[in-house]
Amino acid sequence: MTRRGWVLFAALSLIWGVPYLMIKVAVTELDPVVVAFGRTFLAALILLPIALRQRALGPVVARWRWLLLYTAVEIIGPWWLLGHAETRLTSSTAGLLLAVVPLIAAVVLVTLGRDRFDARRLIGLGVGLAGVVTLVGLDVHLDDLASVGAVMLTAIGYAIGPIIINRKLADLPPMGVVTASLVVATVVFAPFAVWLRPDHVSAAAGWSVVGLAVVCTAVAFLVFFALIAEAGPARATVITYINPAVAICLGVLVLGEKFTVGVAIGFPLVILGSVLATAKTRTRSSTAEPVPC
């Protein structure tokens, strides 16, 4: 990747390592649907005036079918499922489980004929997956397997979303795509959020939802689109190998979560997997080959 790509990669790795902590705090008192609604509603409220001023929504409306699909797999399904999973799993565990996103994305792209594996990337993805398997085997109880399944479905959505952007929405204004998808998600979540609304919200839960909306959604999605354009969808999703580092540190330092044997073994494996999986695929002449768009 270029220097700009690495800067975007580092920034997004940090920003999207924080949501696991905020979600964990919020779902201790709020239903996951309410948390997801607050996140999408506030973020849309921030971005909508900017999108309207830039006239960025018009081109997006013409491709509404792809927008709806992207919104479903990247926002509606994952944010609801991840919230439910974190009612049982620790924030550190949820963050580490999502390290399978690059593997899923790579498999999908290879299946579509849009990318290919070389030995180094295969080893990197395998090492990262081994870290996740170690975590599940050592730390997750049998009665939490449904929550693990919810995180895995979230991972599938997170892997497919960037591919849809790269292949069907990349030429549209990023501000328009982000804002329109958040508005659609808000409309979907709204009736359920009204039904499940709480009588009281503590400062901790309230500020967690605000942080999710402003930093981890409004700002993060704009950085995410820029990273996809710079590095391609498969390598953009490798941020999910770095996010766990932030999630683990915050979980231990802020929430008092245990630094378990599964985390101790799984964490270095996913970091090593990250380094190897971001290596560029090379041709036989050893020249770098860009990710097909």
Image (cartoon, grey):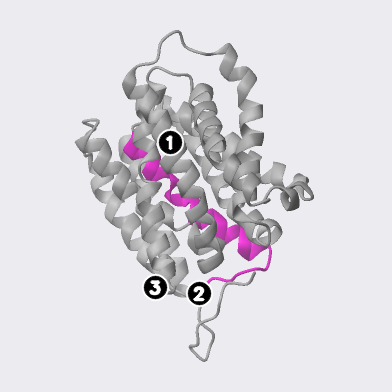
261 sits to left or right of 149: left
Q: Which residue: 23% across, 33% down?
A: 254
Q: CA distance from mark 2 to mark 1?
A: 37 Å
Q: Which residue: 46% across, 69% down?
A: 121
Give the image location of residue 291, x and y in percent.
57, 72
What range is drawn magenta here? Answer: 91-118
95 sits to left or right of 267: right
Q: Earlier in the sequence, mark 3 or mark 2?
A: 3
Q: Residues within 10 Å of mark 1 (few under 14, many from 20)?
A: many
Q: Earlier in the sequence, mark 3 or mark 1?
A: 3
Depicted 15 relative to depicted 288: above or below = above
Depicted 282 relative to depicted 54: above or below = below
Q: Nearer the viewer, mark 3 or mark 2?
A: 3
Identify the element where label 3 is drawn.
helix
User: Which residue is label 2 attached to?
Assistant: 118
Q: Amino acid at mark 3?
A: Arg
Give the image location of residue 236, x and y in percent.
49, 60
User: Which residue is label 3 attached to?
Assistant: 3
Q: Which quarter of the rendered picture does the C terminus lie within?
A: bottom right
Q: Which quarter of the rendered picture does the N terminus lie within?
A: bottom left
User: Which residue is label 1 attached to?
Assistant: 212
Can residue 105 be found in the magenta stretch? Answer: yes
Can residue 98 be found in the magenta stretch? Answer: yes
Depicted 273 relative to depicted 115: above or below = above
Q: Which residue: 60% across, 54% down?
A: 174
